[in-house]
Amino acid sequence: MVQLGKRYRCEECGTEMLCTKPGEGQPKCCDKEMGIQEPRPLPSSD
């Protein structure tokens, strides 16, 4: 299932997709399912 507001990324070519409507199924690119992109860590404010 595609989740609203999540970013999906293709590991093969680097294409990124932002989900604007939730629904059934899984986004595909380069004949492979795209994985959810994890949030980038924020730099520390030491």
Image: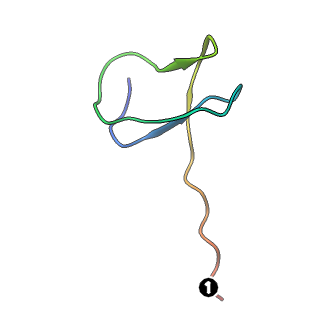
The number of numbered discs placed on residues in the rendered structure image is 1
Where residue 46 sits: x, y (%)? 66, 89
Q: Residues within 10 Å of mark 1 (few under 14, many from 20)?
A: few
Left or right: 24, with 13 as reference point: left
Would you identify the image quadrant in which residue 35 lies? top right
Q: Nearer the viewer, residue 1 or 7?
A: 7
Left or right: 46, with 22 as reference point: right
Q: Secondary structure at mark 1?
A: loop
Residue at the extreme bottom: 46
Residue at the extreme top: 31
Q: Residue at x 56, y 25 (%)?
A: 34
Where residue 5 sits: x, y (%)? 36, 43
Residue at the extreme right: 12
Would you identify the image quadrant in which residue 21 lies? top left
Q: Residue at x 53, y 17 (%)?
A: 28
Coloured how?
rainbow
Q: Is residue 14 above or below residue 39?
A: above
Where residue 45 sits: x, y (%)? 61, 85
Q: Is residue 37 above or below residue 12?
A: below
State the quadrant of the N terminus: top left
Would you identify the image quadrant in which residue 40 lies? bottom right
Q: Kindly identify which residue carries mark 1.
A: 45
Q: Is residue 3 above or below residue 44?
A: above
Residue flagged by tag 1: what amino acid is it? Ser
Q: Is residue 43 above or below residue 31?
A: below
Where residue 38 sits: x, y (%)? 57, 47
